[in-house]
Amino acid sequence: MVGSVWAALGLSLACISALGLISPAWFQSHTFSFGVLTYCSLPQGDSWNQSCGTFRSLADIPDFAWKVSAAILLGGWLLLAFNAVLLLAWALAPKRLCPRRGNGPMPGVQAAAATVTIVGLLVFPISLASPFAKGACGASSVYHGGQCQLGWGYVIAILSAVLASFLPMIGWPHMTKVHGRIILFSGDTEKIILMPEMSI
C-alpha cells in the first residue's frame, strides 16, 4: 500500500515537473510569454488566437545562460522520471524480491533531482538580460523582469522542486538509540527492528 502511494507521488511529481518545463508561461507580458522550451505571441485584444513555438534544440535557444538552465532542468526532470520508474517497479515487485523500507529504493535520486532543478531555476532568470527577453519584456536585466511578470509555469517548476526536496524527508525511517542498539521504526513493515551498534 505504501509503495503504491510513493509510486503515485513520484509519477505525479514527474508529470508536474514536465508541465512546468514545457509551459510557455514562465515570464509573460501583455503580448508575449516564454518559458524554457516554448514561447507564445498573444495578439492585442484576442487572447484566444495565440501563436506558439518551441526551441527544438539547444542551438535554437537564444542565450547561453538559458541553454545552461534548459540542460540542467532537463537533467533534473530525467532524474525525477527515472525515480518515478524505480518507484513504480518497487511498488509492483513482489515483497520477497524487493523488501520495503522507507520511502523507496533510492531516495537519493529524488533529492538529487530536486537539487539539480533548484540550480536550474536559479540560473534561468539570468537569461532575462538576453536580447530575446529584452525584446519581449522591455528593460529586463538579470533577475529583473522589466515589463514581464512571473508566470504560472515558473511557479509550477518551483513547487515541483520544493516537493521533490521534501518528499524524501517525509518517508525517511525514524531512528532512535536505546541501550547501545539502533531501533528502526518503519511504517511499511510496522515492526521494530533491533540492530546491534557497529563501530567503524
Image (tube, rainbow, N blue to C red):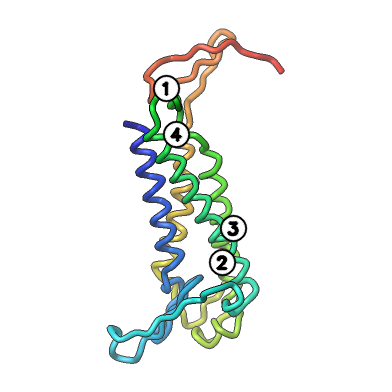
Local secondary structure at mark 2: helix
- Badge 4 crowding class, 10 Å Cα cut-off, few under 14, some 14 to 19, many 20 or more, is many
Residue nearer the viewer, 52 or 197:
52
The residue sitting at 56% across, 66% down in the picture is 70
Reading the image, the residue beneath label 3 is 119
The residue sitting at 57% across, 47% down in the picture is 112
Residue 200 location in percent, x, y? 71, 18
Mark 3 against mark 1, which lies toward the viewer?
1
Reading the image, the residue beneath label 4 is 103
Reading the image, the residue beneath label 1 is 96
* Amino acid at the residue labelled 3: Val
Question: With respect to residue 100, does 139 lie above or below?
Answer: below
* Amino acid at the residue labelled 1: Arg
Residue 102, by quadrant, is top left
Q: Earlier in the sequence, mark 2 or mark 4?
A: 2
Q: CA distance from mark 3 to mark 4?
A: 24 Å
Reading the image, the residue beneath label 2 is 70
Q: Earlier in the sequence, mark 3 or mark 1?
A: 1
* Amino acid at the residue labelled 4: Asn
Q: Earlier in the sequence, mark 4 or mark 1?
A: 1
Mark 3 against mark 4, which lies toward the viewer?
4
Q: Earlier in the sequence, mark 2 or mark 1?
A: 2
Residue 74 location in percent, x, y? 54, 60
Residue 169 location in percent, x, y? 48, 37
Residue 155 location in percent, x, y? 42, 63
Q: Earlier in the sequence, mark 3 or mark 4?
A: 4
